[in-house]
Image (tube, rainbow, N blue to C red):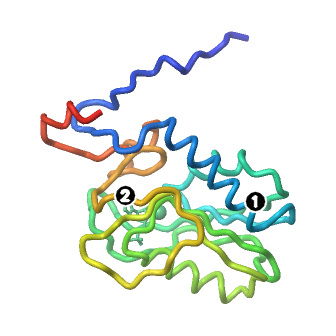
Amino acid sequence: MSELDCTDRPFSPGPGLRVVIGRDTLAARVEQLAGEITDCYGSGEITIVGVMTGAFIFLADLMRSLSMPIRLDIVSVCSYPGESIKSRGPQLTLPPTADLAGKDVLLVDDILDSGKTMTFLLDLFSAARPASLRTCVLLQKDLDQPVDRPEADFVGFEIADEFVVGYGLDYDGMYRGLADLCVLDPSPSSEGDK
Ligand code: IMP
Ligand code: MG
């Protein structure tokens, strides 16, 4: 079996992209978050509901840093159809399959922006009468215009109010595989920001 060496991937994500959180910082914070989640739940079973598609890389990394028994379910919510960078409101495109009644449920999403997705999912999941319902997001946007949104129980990073891609997050279905979190930045001067 051949050995794969992924350590030599170029750090530059490509033209028009500016790194805002590098892969090492992401990895270190995900480990810390797993510690915070373990401090909260202890060693009891939890049910994680991951929100597709944006959370898939964060979810995979986070789960592998947790050691309690985990039941996993996924839901899919679409907020930014096509080339839109303005949310048109969440639509459930894949509903949950697990019975959440009586379970300790942790909702894991990529980013808390307007909060509409989280509000929508919290309403949906509360109706299933879980024993507890908490939320974890990798990113929380520090919005220019304050909005009435739910607080997440676990937050990886606060970021500026910019549209970010990479580490699972997309623009029009692209960039999800970038190892670093980046901003789409058309200005050539962004080359100096790495
Ligand atoms: P909200 O409903 O406005 O809070 O948006 C949450 C969802 O929109 C997230 O789960 C993401 O899928 C998507 N989203 C929000 N902001 C961004 C961004 O900057 N880049 C990529 N996706 C985003
Ligand atoms: Mg999402």
- The residue at which mark 1 appears reads as 38
- For disc 2, does the CB lie below 8 Å from ligand 1? no
Disc on the earlier residue, 2 or 1: 1
Q: Residue at x 34, y 66 (%)?
A: 142
- Disc marking residue 91: none
**Mark 2 Cα-neighbour bin, 10 Å: few <14, some 14–19, many ≥20:** some
Q: Tell me: 3 left or right of 28.
A: right
Q: Which quadrant is the N terminus positioned in?
A: top right
In this rendering, would 10 be left or right of 26?
left
Amino acid type, mark 2? Ile
Picture coordinates of residue 133 (x, y %)?
A: 68, 78
Report how many numbered discs are placed on residues in the image.
Answer: 2
Q: Residue at x 76, y 77 (%)?
A: 100
Query: What amino acid does circle 1 point to?
Result: Thr
Label 1: which secondary element:
helix
Task: Please report the residue visible at 65 percent of the width from the left and 50 percent of the height from the top.
Answer: 62
Depth check, front residue: 153 or 186: 153
Q: Is residue 71 left or right of residue 95?
A: right
**Label 1, residues with CA under 10 Å away: few <14, some 14-19, many ≥20:** some
The CA distance from mark 2 to mark 1 is 24 Å
Figure check: 4 above or below 145: above
Pick the front one: 78 or 122: 122
Query: From this viewpoint, is residue 53 visible?
Result: no
In the picture, residue 71 is in which quadrant? bottom right
Q: In the displayed orientation, state which residue is furthest to the left.
A: 188
Q: Position of residue 113 (x, y in %)?
A: 38, 69
- According to the image, label 2 marks what residue? 159
Residue 149 image point, x, y percent = 43, 81
Relative to residue 99, is residue 120 drawn left or right? left
Q: Secondary structure at mark 2?
A: strand
Front-most of 183 and 153?
A: 153
Q: Residue at x 70, y 54 (%)?
A: 35
